[in-house]
Amino acid sequence: MLKFVCLFLICLWGTSNGLYAQNVDSLERALAKAKYPEQKSILLKKLAWIYRNIRLKNALDYAHQSLDLAKKTNNRKLEAEVTRMIGVIYLHFVYHNEGLEWTQRALLLSQEIDFDEGVGFCYDSFGVTYYYQKKYIQAEEYFQNALKIF
């Protein structure tokens, strides 16, 4: 379990500092040039991911735009990924109930489309959420389920 927590913290640290501004600028330029809805959805997803630790509103705006485009293009895998990302964004801003709700939606969608990696990431998100809530037994169960998949 400690391994998962450490990886999570490393991911948090890795997108901080001045690198995010450079990434935001290049992604926004690419978004302005993107011709296809699926391309735009992927770029919006990347922007949402960058903002997940910085600004809740920006992160959610980008994520919901990405989700809308994923649905319009019927890209169910991308829809599942973005849905889970919305849960992660809420978790980063300590909105655990919303995070769990969105992660549950992503889990159901991932299971429906047989997206095992998505299921594993959902279990990991549940584990992180319960860990922060100091529900260590539940957290460990979800981490173990994720570990079995990965």
Image (cartoon, helix red, strand yellow):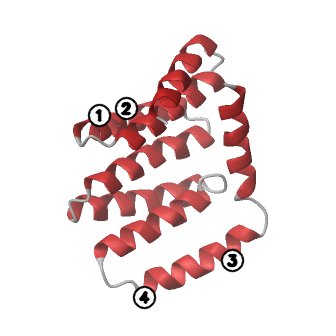
Q: Left or right: 141 with respect to 112?
A: right
Q: Residue furthest top?
A: 137
Q: Left or right: 149 with respect to 11?
A: left
Q: Is there CB contact under 8 Å for labels 2 and 1? A: yes
Q: Amino acid at mark 1?
A: Leu
Q: Determine the CA span between mark 3 and mark 1.
A: 35 Å
**Residue 118, x across and y down, in percent:** 40, 42
Numbered badge on residue 22: 3
What residue is pinned by disc 4?
33
**Residue 59, x across and y down, in percent:** 53, 57
**Residue 93, x across and y down, in percent:** 61, 42
Which of the pair 126/147 is nearer the observer?
A: 147
Q: Residue at x 63, y 15 (%)?
A: 136
What residue is pinned by disc 2?
104
Q: Determine the CA span between mark 2 and mark 1.
A: 6 Å
What residue is pinned by disc 1?
108
